[in-house]
Amino acid sequence: MGRYIIQRVALGLAILLVAISVLYALMITLPGDPTTVFLGPRATDEMRAVFSERLGLNNPVPVQILQFWGRIFSGDLGEDVLRNRPVATPVFAALPNTLILVLASIGWSAALGILLGAFSAACRNSLVDRVTGVLSVAMLAAPSFVVALWSLLIFAVVLNWFPAIGAGEHGDLADRIHHLVLPSFAIGLAWVGYIARIVRASMLEVMGENHIRTARAFGLPPHKIIYRYALRIAVLPAVSVLGVGVGGLLSSAVFAEIVFARPGIGRLIYESVISRNYPVVMGSMLVAIAFFVMCTLAADLVNAMLDPRLRTSKKS
Amino acid sequence: MKAALDIRDLSVDYHTRAGRLHALRNVDLLVPDGEVVGLVGESGCGKSTLISAVLRLLAENAEVPGGEIVLDGTDLLSLSDAEMRLRRGRDVSVVFQDPMTGLNPVLTIGRQMIDIQHREALSRAARRERAVDMLARVRIPDPASRMDSYPHELSGGMRQRVAIAMALMMNPKLLIADEPTTALDATLEVQIIELLQELQGEIGCAILFISHHLGVIAELCQRVVVMYAGSAVEEGGVRDIFHAPAHPYTKALLDCDPGRIRERRQTLPSIPGSLPDLTAPPPGCIFADRCTKADAGCGATQPPRIDTAPGHWATCHFAEAMR
Amino acid sequence: MSIAERSSFKYTAVGRLMSDPLAVAAVTIIALLVLCAVFADAIAPYDYKALNVRERFAPPSFVHLLGTDNLGRDTFSRLLFGARIALFVGLTSVGLAALIGLMLGMVAGFGPRWLDNAILFLFDTLRAYPTIILALALGALLPPGLGTVILVVVLTTFSEYGRVARTQTQALSAQEFIDAERAMGASPARILFMHILPNVLGPFFILAAINLPVVITIEAGMSFLGVGVAPGTPSWGATLKDGFDYIRNTPWLIVSGGIPLVLVTLGFTFLGESLRDVLDPKLRKER
């Protein structure tokens, strides 16, 4: 287990390092004056000179990448030159909003998806199974930003049930949850169908295994067999998929945050891209990609926790 | 003689694409109280279907068109699903063949052993104590700490002991052992057989022991039932069956047993031919096609059950002559 | 595989596909999309870029079937031309991604261990970029246009094809008949193209069918964010963006701009599933 964790973490770190380095290299080598790239077109010549000196932009590219990581590891995400503040300030102000959004979306969609999947597998070919089958494909088919726009139109603009803008007042939990409903609905909807399908398929496989026959031979109640004996195994593939799927969730979060004007990482990246505020783009992308790599890692580790067969490599 | 299990005239059909498959046809089988009865036959002879029918764990496409399965005085076929579920694992329990896949891989041994006591009015601690006690009785070393192990942390032999402990924990009237030693090597097989014998003596349950290892059957059982292609073809005391088989199939089966071949030879003997098509069973004797004794009458009329000695019968026209 | 076997396989595969009602529905939707894209000029009642200040914000009517946008452009005509863009971006980038993935995957599966590891690491690294976030970054650095969209899509999707090609190559090159070929002196290129390529094609078709709507959605998404097609191009995403900006004036843009995306996704998803059932019996879900 220890070895496995170390391997996974090392690979995750390597991927993160390379992914960010490539992006950084692209930014500094692309045509155009790097100081323009970093400071934006509105910078003065004086600012450019100071900046070039400070970031070592006259050094060779590999040295610059090393210097970049040196700054990152000393806790400096860079300087938001346009607004004269550390990049870390807007990034870490936005991060919690995105985390809450992503977690809420995973939470409700996984819960509902697992339940629907298990139920359709348990009552195969029942009405619920058939309806779930059709619905899950329909949910899959709706791109998250279309769902976001449609739910904005229907529930916020026309019906006025939910707020259209923002993340809610700080400290007012009910208000924040109220603001969370539509964006997390838009992000999670496709996942409900996806997870339901995965769980249904793996559930049907597990239900045919010998140990389930054993459980039935001991007269265990059917709901216990399904929800404790089979589901624990059947959710494992869904957990792996969720980990990888956080990348897709982050992409969806960009749209949801823009459509619902929610201050999060996705919106921050979008706004800095539009205003050509590259240090902030770089800093927030670093955080977003790091978050994604960590989620993939976490999914592997959660899987190992749920599946004792993976956990005890010390024995076998 | 009181019977732990008395199966009378049991038939089971499967609905398949090729048509109705008559997997069991008019099977009779008797397991007297406290005795060990062996059930032998080739793969595909309907042993598994028989067990599933008794436990009502048949596949969805199965149907029971007729017969009785009397367990301890009650016809199981007359019970509702819920009533049947309450009996499974308590009145009749089972040890399956493959110890590697028979236990849930993500739950501890203890969790599974405690869960199967769901019908007992016991506290959690008492259930745990009973499970530990049972693990000790099947000679699992350090049973209390084994409760927290996962199945994959145990060897195959150990897992089969756990399976036996689970099956016997509720003191069932009948234990069905479905080739419990086939997946194990020879040394372990002997240990498991001895363990079963010992526990059977203590608990006093009847055992229906399924195996194609004739040596094990001879060692363990008092009575033997021989099945062929979904029919019970012969039943009798273990000595009668082994020394005076009354059905040509039994005789052929015994002749093919590597354990009983005396002289050196190049090839192992086998029964020529293959199992009949059970979607359209022949009108006469089911074994007629492969039987060395068969004549025209065998293919046309079904042989009746012929008693050759007290408690020994066979379904063969030549049963008397075989002796 | 002989020619006769091949054509009979194809015949039964297509025959089986057409006996599945979902597949028929899928093919109908896709055919409709292709027709719209090809004959957009003929079908469209208006010039998709014609401004008409007097008919700004016109709701759906018989004059403008799906209304007009803030510049008075006819929504229905724009959506028809949007099909052309979606299909062009979809086919080009799926083709490119499959080609690059195929080559890298076969090299990884067939080549030495270190090369395999290096290529796998490349795949893993590319997977670490959330698509839209990478799209935003590149969109900020590169000028908007179809080329940028295709570059982003190819970068984020070719590793999927690469993985499939690699797995298939490895599985096949472990088989005996490949060993036999090798023993008879067949060159690696011959083995790759004669034996491995035909076996990779089936899974690739399935993957492509599943990926096409994803790609089309990415294009629409990037255009929605303003880092996709050049301003004025009638991408479905751009229509949605106009609808979002004027949500209280032209809500019909959001409704009608989303419908083709949903339909296309539905069509290709059903097609992918049916293809999987027909081409890959091992993966067939029992239902």
Image (spheres, rainbow, N blue to C red):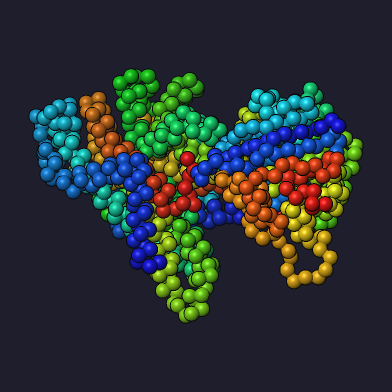
Of A235 and C251, nearer the camera is A235
Q: Residue at x 47, y 47 (%)?
A: C284
- Vertical placement of A204 versus C252: above or below? below
Spot occupied by residue C28 in the image (x, y as percentages of width and height) = 27, 42
User: For this view, does B315 lie left or right of residue C231?
Assistant: right
Q: Quadrant of the N terminus of chain B?
A: top right
Residue B155 appears in the rendering: no
Q: Residue at x 73, y 53 (%)?
A: B249
Residue visible at 80% across and 48% down? B320
Image location (x, y in percent) of residue A268: 39, 39
Q: Is residue C104 above or below residue B11?
A: below
Q: In the rendered view, does B293 fall on the left or right side of A260?
A: right
C103 or B275, which lies in front? Answer: B275
Residue B64 seen by the camera: yes
Give residue A276's quadrant in the image: top left
Q: Tell me where residue A148 appears, x and y as whole percent.
A: 36, 32
Using the image as rendered, state which of residue C181 and residue A166 is in the foreground: C181
Residue A1 appears left or right of C180: right
Check the image and name the residue furthest to the bottom.
C185
- Is residue C80 positioned above or below A37 on the image? above
- Looking at the picture, how far across and down is residue A19, in whole percent? 46, 54
Count numbered badges in the picture: 0
Q: Nearer the viewer, residue B266 or B154?
A: B266
- For the point 72% across and 32% down, the residue is B69
